[in-house]
Image: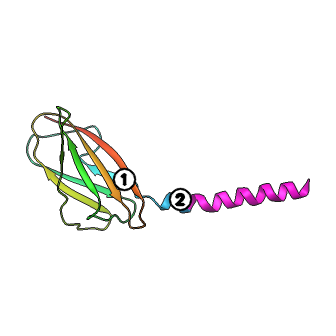
Amino acid sequence: MPAKRVLTATLLLSVLFLIPRIALAHAILVSSTPAANAVVREDSTAVELRFNSRVDGQRSRLTLVLPNGQTQPLPLEKQTAATTLNSHLAAKPGSYIIRWQALSTDGHITRGEIPFTVR
């Protein structure tokens, strides 16, 4: 019985030590402009995605999903901070989605969507 408890305790400790390393391996979106479900004006809108870790701006992507379902790439600007991706868009009234794909500097890719409305 004691050997089984030692094995169980060892496995639990191993998992606990691995969880923080796994969590830090991905670039997690911390905030965005526009924010999810935000309503923005029809004029030119600045786009900024801020992550919890460094991202590779040259290998990350932003795509805009238009109200009719078509997509168009959003060109990324030169990174001003290692944890952000920036772009600009000009959009007419409607519902849009920014799809993002970020490559963290450790090689892990994360993806997500930010829906917003232009009025």
Residue placed most toward the observer, 37 or 10: 10
Residue placed most toward the observer, 45 or 113: 113
Query: Which quadrant holds residue 41?
Result: top left
For the stretch drawn in magenta, the main secondary structure is helix
Residue 88 x/y as whole percent: 14, 53
Sequence-first tag of 1 and 2: 2
Magenta stretch contains residue 5: yes
Residue drawn at x 48%, y 61% as measured from the top left: 24
Query: Which quadrant holds residue 83?
Result: bottom left
Amino acid carrying label 1: it is: Leu
Instruction: Give the secondary structure at mark 2.
Output: helix
Image disc number at residue 29: 1
Between the residue at mark 1 and the residue at mark 2, the CA separation in whole angstroms equals: 16 Å
Residue drawn at x 34%, y 63% as measured from the top left: 55
Query: Given contact means CB atoms under 8 Å apart, are the residues at marks 1 and 2 in contact?
Result: no
Residue 27 x/y as whole percent: 40, 58
Q: What residue span does the magenta drawing correspond to?
A: 1-20
Image disc number at residue 100: none
**108 lies left or right of 85:** right
The C terminus: image quadrant: top left
Q: Residues within 10 Å of mark 1 (few under 14, many from 20)?
A: some
Give above or below for 51 relative to 63: below
Residue beneath label 2, please?
22
Residue drawn at x 26%, y 65% as measured from the top left: 58
**109 lies left or right of 72:** right
**38 lies left or right of 31:** left
Residue 48 x/y as whole percent: 24, 55
Amino acid carrying label 2: it is: Ile
Magenta stretch contains residue 102: no
Discs 1/2, front: 2
